[in-house]
């Protein structure tokens, strides 16, 4: 067979995976064509591509799943190959065949392999025939209630009902006793029918202390099949992966070898000829492993494998699809170090991991050696309800597991993603858990650790949040006050006494009490007085010194909403409650007092002057910032107690008006 050329490649996908594929194409000198829906017009993957073609409206069925439109764009652009990414059309037999019919290379395995693996029952039956261990269960044709009940009884409880055409964790139900079986079956069938237009199911024994360990497989068109080591993806929510790592902390050398060989047997049994993944569930207690399924595409978590092996899996996919022989033998596959991936999602872990939509206002990545971020977002990227809420994949490599985890923890603390609710703080809590660090976990780890899905702030964290919020508001008022300097604003009055700001966060109202001192602030919380200095502030970052320690906060302020990110605290959304109108002790018998230690810049009135309310009286300077003292009522200037250039303490009597 001769090698086909790939000069131009179309990516039938969007987001981070489209950008990921484009990156490899660029390194190979392949021209790229992106397709996009209307809402994705300004996305990064669109600008990354050499050419981008709009293929329709936002609903996937009218764009990324519209096979005929995609093929016609591919032909118009003289595309040699299509990379389907993951999700969308990546495991669609009709699409892979349409590509072939139009003489376009579909970058993936042969359509028979896709077809047989797209059915959980057929996949299982093929594996049984090839002596690959499968989870005990029923994957037969007789779907009558009577038969399924009989099979369920044989398997025992708990058991798992799975949709034959299921994927992405959909259409699964755990049943713990026979009396629940019928209603769970109905629910699974309903969900499966609406998601996959098919209500056939299989039954499996539920492995209660299971670990998800999968093997990357690779085959070419000449019958060469190898595995490229494992990834452990046990940490999941709703049967979907949250964290992936390699090497697995669970596998012994022997078990790795045995499972790797089994993965190759599974792949060979379907003449596998591109990148794929054989998923296993391993019983944590017995060490027995069972085949779950083969994903016939590039996997979301493929970067984990790339980081420890140094291979470019997309390049390998393209090479094999062109008809090249796999130039990698099993014995060539070596791993070095340790890699972890976390999936940063726009979702609310504190509300059932419900997906969130909105705009990412600020996205910035720390610089960490060995950190790889696969994302397709930047400032102002939209996370819409139309697509997967994945924001970024955070992947790090360390020389060993401990180093990888500390780099991950640091990276996660310093990544800034503001504007939308994400699972960032949850992920940080998760990977800092002792049991996770030790590798002691099973698939229900998140469910079992309900403290992970509650946020708790310590008293010192709360104080830091309130101080940051108060100083951001204080500074904002000061800078806007320069423009409106003769409008009497609340804050000037409160120089004289403690100013109170009220905030709402963490489902509660909080009050922050503070006053300006010379070049610093004093905050009072309950009976604690804290001296705080504002070191630096611009419209996105603030540095605050507290107890001789400077902390940095990234923030975004829009009216009364302040989004704050801090390394130690994570992401907070602070709402400023309307300010207390307190005209305090500023004027005492017509005497105006200096609000804080300051210098007199200008005296604008003379003794005996007749003045009206709001007339400017004196300009003072403090903390490198000028403020104007204005009259609060009509009157006559009786005494002036200060001269220009004079330095005064707070509460110094400035002027007396009758
Ligand atoms: P993995 O996440 O390990 O690659 P899954 O089977 O959990 O494997 O999901 C595969 C991917 O397919 C998901 O990450 C998701 O992005 C994508 N996906 C799932 N369902 C859909 C869908 N209806 N439309 C588009 N993409 C989907
Ligand atoms: P999908 O196609 O949705 O990815 P899988 O069969 O791969 O479906 O299962 C998804 C997840 O569900 C697994 O990673 C595992 O956590 C859990 N799971 C699947 N089968 C079993 C089982 N028999 N026992 C325990 N957990 C299982
Ligand atoms: Mg799976």
Image: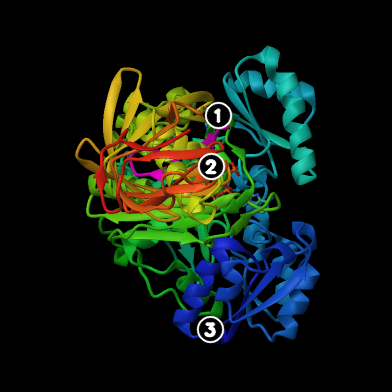
649, above or below 582, in the image: below
Tell me which secondary structure the magenta stretch mostly adopts: strand
Say few, some or many: other residues with alpha carbon within 10 Å of mark 1 (under 14 / 14 to 19 / 20 or more): few
Question: Which is nearer the N-term, disc 2 or disc 1?
Answer: 2
Mark 3–mark 2 distance (CA, rounded to whole Å) = 64 Å
Q: Which residue is mark 3?
A: 30
- The answer to whether residue 490 is magenta is no
Q: Which residues are magenta?
A: 564-578
First in sequence: mark 3 vs mark 2: 3
Query: Foreground mark, 3 or 2?
Result: 2
Q: Which mark is residue 581?
A: 1
Relative image position of residue 639 (x, y in whole percent): 38, 39
Compared to 615, does 378 lie above or below? below
Are the residues tagged 2 and 1 within 8 Å (C-beta)?
Answer: no
Residue matched to label 2: 488
Separation of residues labelled 2 and 1 (CA atoms) = 12 Å
Residue 202 visible in rendering: yes
Q: Position of residue 470 (x, y in %)?
A: 43, 37
């Amino acid at each position: 067979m001769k090698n086909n050329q790939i000069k131009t490649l179309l990516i039938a996908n969007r987001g981070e995976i489209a950008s990921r594929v484009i990156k490899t194409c660029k390194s190979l000198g392949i021209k790229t064509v992106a397709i996009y829906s209307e809402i994705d017009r300004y996305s990064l993957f669109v600008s990354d591509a050499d050419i981008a073609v709009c293929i329709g409206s936002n609903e996937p069925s009218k764009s990324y799943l519209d096979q005929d439109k995609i093929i016609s764009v591919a032909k118009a652009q003289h595309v040699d190959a299509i990379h389907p990414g993951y999700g969308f059309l990546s495991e669609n037999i009709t699409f892979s065949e349409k590509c072939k019919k139009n003489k376009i290379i579909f970058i993936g395995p042969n359509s028979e392999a896709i077809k047989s693996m797209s059915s959980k029952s057929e996949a299982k039956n093929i594996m049984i025939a090839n002596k690959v261990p499968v989870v005990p269960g029923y994957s037969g044709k007789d779907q009558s209630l009577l038969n399924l009940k009989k099979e369920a009884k044989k398997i025992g409880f708990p058991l798992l009902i799975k949709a034959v055409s299921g994927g992405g964790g959909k259409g699964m139900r755990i049943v713990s006793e026979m009396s629940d079986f019928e209603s769970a079956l109905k629910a699974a069938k309903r969900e499966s029918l609406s998601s996959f237009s098919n209500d056939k199911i299989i039954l499996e024994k539920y492995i209660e202390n299971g670990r998800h360990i999968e093997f990357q497989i690779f085959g070419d068109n000449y019958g060469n099949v190898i595995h490229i080591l494992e990834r452990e993806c046990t940490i999941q929510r709703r049967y979907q992966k949250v964290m992936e790592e390699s090497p697995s902390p669970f596998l012994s050398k022997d078990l790795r070898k045995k499972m790797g060989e089994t993965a190759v047997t599974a792949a060979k049994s379907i003449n596998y000829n591109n990148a794929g993944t054989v998923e296993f569930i391993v019983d944590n207690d017995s060490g027995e492993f069972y085949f779950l399924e083969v994903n016939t595409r590039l996997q979301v978590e493929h970067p984990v494998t790339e980081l420890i092996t140094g291979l470019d899996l997309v390049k390998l996919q393209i090479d094999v699809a062109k008809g090249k022989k796999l130039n990698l033998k099993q014995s060539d596959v070596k791993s070095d170090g340790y890699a972890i991936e976390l999936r940063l999602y726009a979702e609310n872990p504190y509300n059932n991991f419900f997906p969130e939509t909105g705009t990412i206002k600020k996205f910035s990545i720390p610089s960490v050696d060995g950190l790889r971020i696969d994302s397709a977002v930047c400032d102002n990227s939209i996370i819409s309800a139309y697509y997967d809420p994945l924001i970024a994949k955070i992947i790090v490599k360390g020389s060993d597991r401990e180093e990888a985890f500390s780099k991950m923890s640091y990276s996660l603390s310093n990544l800034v993603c503001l504007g939308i609710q994400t699972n960032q703080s949850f992920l940080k809590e998760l990977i800092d858990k002792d049991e996770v660090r030790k590798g002691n976990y099973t698939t229900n780890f998140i469910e079992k650790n309900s403290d992970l899905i509650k946020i708790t702030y310590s008293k010192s964290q709360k104080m830091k949040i309130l101080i940051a919020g108060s100083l951001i508001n204080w500074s904002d008022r000061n800078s806007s006050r320069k423009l409106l300097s003769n409008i009497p604003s609340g804050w000037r009055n409160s120089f004289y006494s403690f100013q109170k700001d009220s905030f709402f966060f963490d489902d509660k109202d909080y009050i922050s009490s503070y006053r300006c001192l010379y070049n610093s602030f004093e905050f009072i919380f309950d009976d604690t007085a804290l001296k705080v200095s504002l070191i630096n502030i611009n419209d996105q970052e603030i540095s605050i010194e507290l107890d001789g320690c400077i902390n940095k906060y990234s923030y975004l302020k829009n009216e009364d909403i302040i989004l704050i990110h801090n390394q130690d605290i994570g992401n907070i959304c602070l709402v400023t409650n309307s300010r207390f109108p307190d005209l305090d002790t500023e004027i005492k018998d017509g005497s105006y007092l200096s609000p804080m230690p300051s210098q007199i810049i200008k005296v604008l009135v003379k003794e005996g002057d007749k003045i009206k309310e709001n007339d400017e009286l004196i300009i003072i300077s403090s903390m490198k910032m000028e403020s104007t003292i204005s009259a609060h009522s009509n009157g006559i200037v009786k005494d002036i107690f200060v001269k220009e250039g004079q330095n005064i303490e707070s509460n110094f009597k400035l002027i007396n008006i009758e």
